[in-house]
Amino acid sequence: MVTDSKTIPHRGIIVGNYCHDILLNNNLVIAETLGGAASFISTVLDALSLPFHLVSKVGPDFTHAALTTNHPPLVIPTSQTTIFHAHFGSNHPDRILNRVGSCDPITPSEIPSGSRFEFGMAVGVGGEILPETLEKMLEICDFVFVDIQGLIRRFEDKDGRVNHVGLKESGFFHLLPKISFLKASEDEALFIDLEEVRKWCCVVVTHGKDGCEVFCKDGCLKVDPFQVCQVDPTGAGDCFLGGFAAGIVQGLDVYDAALLGNFFGSLAVAQVGPPSLDMNLVQMVKEEMNKRKVKDTPCSEKIDKLPVFRKPHDQDQFYASLVAAKDKIMYHIQENGWKSSPKLVDQSNVKAKPVINSVQQGPISSVVDK
């Protein structure tokens, strides 16, 4: 089913299923988009010209084949595409997430073998990452970045509401010493013993509009955010992780990589679905990254030898250059994106439509009073 990795000229591997994301405001659909962490991360890595192989599963009901031609998923005839409903509304200002359908998990046999990858990214969203699958990735990759949501998410039987278990109870805890970076949102970080986990691997905790922090056994760094008008928070953490991983792999120190992650996270929340990025403007970012490189091949070194806690003396210059790039990208989106891209929806102007003839496969259950 999967080509041997000797024939795959890619530096990295991303493992995680594509999804159908249904966004609802007061139980009315306002957008139906391509989802899954893999879709957001792919957008960032492609923009930064970082080649990778993708392992992702969908069912024959997958509706976004045209958007994934560069990184097509495995179509499983006997399964369905994972579907999430993200509920917003006056009665619940924070997003309420339900998994209403799920594709098959990704097994170790579906991970390429035969040669090594410089980096791997385990980015499950719907329970598709198995402990044995992550273990296989750890065997064939020099660096592995893991999003904790793929490890600790659990789903209620009744309506698929997303809950979490503690990392120690997840079945993945024993793999921590082999993981390079573990990314968690500040809400997800409540389900890990940060002081213990940071002894085994570096932990990156995202704080939304307040930036992020990086914790390792010898210290921590707080990294500044980028200001942006939020449209949809879906995928912000995924784009952050894509930018952060790309920075590490392409030779940035950890502080600059985290700043790059915050930059791409801010672009994600300003749009619905995987962000639309103008390649000419992203070139500005790539040129700044080249100026900031501290190593050409950081993946050849152990993580504890990376310059994790050195805040660059000229970090304000890098931040300013990213702010300038972000402003230009956002101007381009506002001038052209709303008109040209079906992925983008201006929620302030969109007319909500009743939930009929949708990929969601059934009526939307109310989340009021849940």
Image (spheres, rainbow, N blue to C red):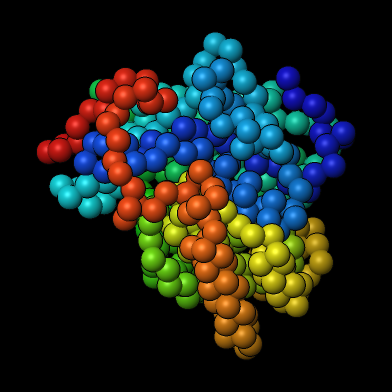
Q: Position of residue 40 (x, y in %)?
A: 56, 47
Residue located 69% across and 23% down the image: 109
Tell me the quarter of the picture where residue 293 sits. Answer: bottom right
Q: Does residue 193 appear anywhere in the picture?
A: no
In this figure, what is the number of numbered marks? 0
Q: Position of residue 61 (x, y in %)?
A: 52, 20
The N terminus appears in which quarter of the rendering? top right
Residue ranking furthest to the front? 339
Q: Position of residue 200 (x, y in %)?
A: 55, 55
Q: Position of residue 77 (x, y in %)?
A: 58, 12
- Up-down relation of residue 24 to residue 215 (above or below): above
- Up-down relation of residue 343 to residue 217 (above or below): above
Residue ranking furthest to the left? 369
Q: Could you say which is closer to the camera, residue 27 or residue 119?
A: 27
Q: Does residue 92 appear anywhere in the picture?
A: yes
Q: Could you say which is closer to the camera, residue 204 or residue 324?
A: 324
Q: Could you say which is closer to the camera, residue 24 or residue 38?
A: 24
* Residue 57 horizontal side relative to residue 150, left or right: right
Residue located 52% across and 68% down the image: 331
The C terminus appears in which quarter of the rendering? top left
* Residue 96 horizontal side relative to residue 218, left or right: left
Tell me the quarter of the picture where residue 280 sits. Answer: bottom right
Q: Could you say which is closer to the camera, residue 172 or residue 48?
A: 48
Residue located 75% across and 77% down the image: 291
Residue ranking furthest to the top? 78
Residue located 59% across and 26% down the image: 57
Residue ranking furthest to the right? 7
